[in-house]
Amino acid sequence: MKRFENFMRWMNVLVIFATFFAYLAPFANPARFWPFSFFGLIYPWLLLTNILFVLYWSILKKKYLVLSLGCILMGWGHVKSFVGFNSFDKVKTEKVITVGSYNIHNLGSLRIGLKTKKEKEKKANEFVQFLKREHEIQILCTQETNKYNIQFIKQKFNFPYIHKKSGKSPVIFSKYPIFNSGIIDFAKNSNSCLWADIKINNQNIRVYSIHFQSNQVSTMADKVIEDADLSKKETFKDIKGMMGRFKLYVKLRAHQAQLVANHLATCPHPVIICGDFNDTPQSYTYNLLTQKLKDTFKEKGRGFGTTYAGKIPALRIDYILLDKKIKVHSHEILKGNFSDHYPVICKISI
């Protein structure tokens, strides 16, 4: 029993060190040192493990519970980036603007596996009702959006103003006039950042729709999770391949985020950033873009902030960031099976 207790104590210490590495991840540029980024990625599981250790030592009535408890409290800001403890404001409807960000995954769910026209129409109507719910969205930023999706969303949600670029994933839909627009091109396939200057009630606002580079490990991750057999060489080969891709693309995202940060520095208007960052709040990318902006989830989010619907669990990688002059009234993550991401919806006032 004593030997097992010593083993658990050392395991607890290792988890605490790994958690501190996750705390350092937002400040370490992966271009110089990337391993911290990996610990930032698995932070939700490190948090859960620390909580389990607190419970374990509490049951045994051992003072070692202060180790993980202290670790959690020291990183309370990181806890709040993953779990929301907020309440929504009650505001007058006419003063509120609803903003959404959604990686729609090319809306493949509205076509794939559906054979008849009636089935497709039914699925399309379900999608419209799902995204609308009680929301009349005035500004919607989408990612992984093809030509078909643009026309579908424009028609179904009645958006008169659209900013898009051929061959690029992000799109900005607006019910307010767009008077200026452009692109921050990452020169990497469809990944890019579109921006549009929008006039809202005589106030000029710049909106960004971002799709940063994916880790491209979903297929490998699905295979590893399904097999879950560490005795197979193929499993370790897949894990090694996943880490190699993560190392490559976490560096690329840091570069892409720096391009956006440079553009933000020259912006003359208050800004709204929406997008799929493919990075967690414990990342250099997120930290770079939130230095002068606020995260609507941390302001008004409730419950777990998971936005990725794939088999890699507990990831929050989709965001709406706001200028500090803009007030947040609510933040919701709508859970549905129309994409491998969940839409993020918030109500704001300027």
Image (spheres, rainbow, N blue to C red):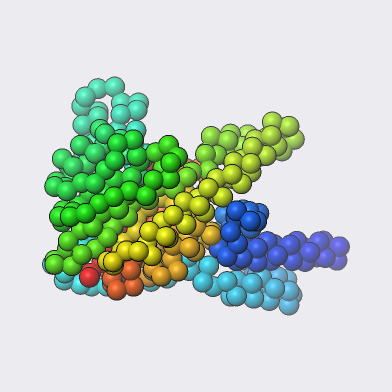
Q: Which residue is drawn at 41% across and 56% down?
A: 260
The residue closer to the viewer here, 342 or 274, is 274
Position of residue 34 measured from the top left corner of the image (x, y, whole percent): 63, 53
Q: Based on the displayed image, in which of its 4 quarters is residue 110 positioned? A: top left
- In the figure, is residue 6 to the left or right of 100? right
On-image quarter of the C terminus: bottom left
Q: Can residue 45 be seen in this view?
A: no
Residue 337 to residue 269: above or below = above
Q: Which residue is drawn at 64% across and 37% down?
A: 241
Q: Based on the displayed image, in which of its 4 quarters is residue 204 positioned? A: bottom left
Residue reaching furthest to the front: 266
- In the figure, is residue 130 to the left or right of 340? left
Residue reaching furthest to the right: 3
Q: Residue at x 33, y 48 (%)?
A: 183
Residue 219 to residue 49: above or below = above
Position of residue 284 measured from the top left corner of the image (x, y, whole percent): 53, 60
Q: Is residue 33 visible?
A: yes
The residue closer to the viewer here, 254 or 266, is 266
